[in-house]
Amino acid sequence: MNPLLFRNLMKASLTNQTNIKKKLVVKSTTDNLSSIRNFVKDATSLAGFSADMSNKVVLAVDEACTNIIKHAYQHSPDGNITIQLNSDVKKVSIKIIDDGGHFNPDKVPDPDLPKLQKEKKAGGLGMFLMKKLMDEVKYKNLSDNRNQVLLVKYRS
């Protein structure tokens, strides 16, 4: 085997940990979105996800957290957003938990993309993007008046 290739393979196996468990808690302000993106990017990279797959996960988490800030907390910076990221050989799972207002994703219609483009209207694509980028998107109200969004991306 080529020594350079062998060295690169060994380096990749040492730096990429398949089983990752990380947690981040931030206040519900858009100022924290960059910290959230960096947290998810670092964790998915460490877990060995490709840059493309990692970027998809980062965007989906960013959309979910933006929705929590805007809708669940109505831009109040006093709420908490907890992000729990777990990865294994099959997938990465991200639980996003908040104490804001409840939400029913079934009441959000799919966007009319041609209409949005024609009207040059921004926004309204968060749920649509999460569903397109991730393999699973599940929302539930937890028993203690909290909300949870579960995002799952399987390794390809």
Image (spheres, rainbow, N blue to C red):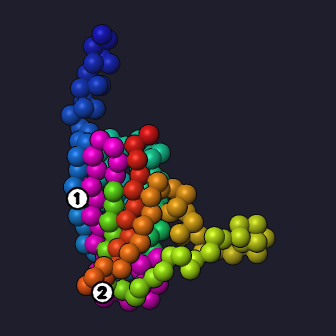
Provide the residue span drawn in magenta: 67-92
Task: Note whether residue 128 is visible.
Answer: yes
Q: In the rendered view of the protein, which quadrant contains the C terminus?
A: top left
For image coordinates 42% across by 78% down, the residue present is: 68
- Locate residue 129 relative to residue 7 in the image: left or right: right
The total of numbered circles placed on residues is 2
Where is residue 1, by image quadrant? Answer: top left
Work out whether 65 lies above or below 146: above
Label 2: which secondary element: loop
Q: Is residue 108 magenta?
A: no
Residue 73 at what x, y percent from top left? 40, 87
Alpha-carbon neighbours of circle 1 within 10 Å: few (<14), some, or many (≥20)?
A: few
Q: Is residue 83 magenta?
A: yes
For image coordinates 39% across by 56% down, the residue present is: 152
Q: Nearer the viewer, residue 121 or 92?
A: 92
For the residues labelled 1 and 2, the Cα–Cα distance comes to 23 Å
- Locate residue 57 relative to residue 145 in the image: left or right: right
Residue kind at label 1, given as amino acid type:
Lys
Residue for badge 1: 22
Residue 145: numbered disc: 2
Residue 70 at what x, y percent from top left? 46, 82
* Lower position in the chain sequence, tag 1 or tag 2: 1
Where is residue 109, by image quadrant? Answer: bottom right
Task: Note whether residue 98 is visible.
Answer: no
Label 1: which secondary element: strand
Work out whether 4 lies above or below 85: above
For image coordinates 56% across by 80% down, the residue present is: 107
Residue 148 at what x, y percent from top left? 35, 73
Q: Nearer the viewer, residue 37 or 154?
A: 154
For image coordinates 40% across by 47% down, the residue present is: 154
